[in-house]
Amino acid sequence: MNLIETCALVTGGASGIGEATVRTIVSKGGKAAILDMDTKRGEKLCSELGSGVIFCKTDVTSETDVKSAISNALDSFGKLNVVLNFAGIAAAVKTLGRDGPHDLDLFKKIVDVNLNGTFNVSRLAAEKISKNEPNESGLTGVIINTASVAGYDGQKGQAAYGASKAGVIGLTLPMARDLASYGIRVNTIAPGLIITPMLASLPEEAQEALSNQPLLPKRLGSPSEIAHLACFMIENEYLNGEVIRLDAGIRLP
């Protein structure tokens, strides 16, 4: 699929990796619906990028919100053929710490947004994508989810985040198998240490320490590098059922 043919839902598209991916798609002639809770950033991005982008305030865990966003995207673009799930949250809390056990509601919230939200958007969008006219390879669209290297080697304080991202990794192949008969590919990106708003808010010395952890190159990754891989996954129709780490060879200690 060429990017110029792309009509995408991009969750978490108002900032960070999602924003970088929206910008890349639009720069190549595609269209994108930003699904995010940050109305101010989302609307500002739409104003900047023009008619190829719409904003839908969306809680990815809400069936009502997601259905509304999909409907808006179809009304605006005429079709939907790509889903990019970047929405996610994190918290640094140990299973047992000085303040006692990990708060269960916080654990549930992280899993709900990162894993259940990803599945919610994917399942609802897949229904619409499956109705597209298949191309010569029998493909109707692609879903790209976002995990994390923490899903493989989560660190202290990442029980909830690591579990949620491991769930996204485990979701990849079964979902690809489920949707193959409908012409929909499914792949997942597992980013390493990327300069997102969350990392950018850390003190400079903390960022410098993190920059030394990747194998090579010794730096934090940029959102545009993840966006580049996401767009490759859209374009390369033979890539399916895969999880790709983009992490400069890091293995979290």
Image (tube, rainbow, N blue to C red):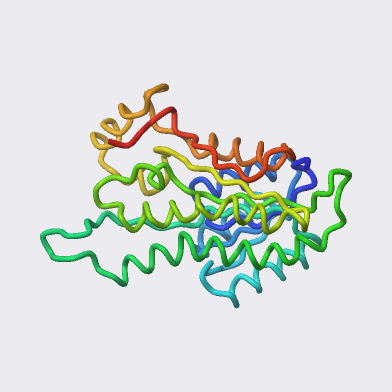
Foreground of the two, 58 or 247: 247
Task: Indicate the quadrant where residue 229 lies.
Answer: top right
Residue at the image point whose x is 76% and y is 64% from the top: 76
Q: Is residue 125 above or below residue 215?
A: below
Q: Is residue 19 left or right of residue 191?
A: right
Where residue 12 appears, as percent x and y from the top left, is 52, 56
Location of the C terminus (image quadrant): top left
Which of the pair 178/185 is nearer the observer?
A: 178
Quarter occupied by residue 125: bottom right
Q: Position of residue 48 (x, y in %)?
A: 63, 50
Q: Residue at x 56, y 63 (%)?
A: 119
159 sits to left or right of 77: left
Whether residue 32 is visible to the viewer of this picture, yes or no, is no
**Direction from residue 98 to residue 243 in the image, left or right:** right
Q: Which residue corresponds to the image point at 31% horizontal and 67% vertical from the top-left?
A: 106
**In terms of depth relative to the viewer, which is nearer, 183 or 89?**
183
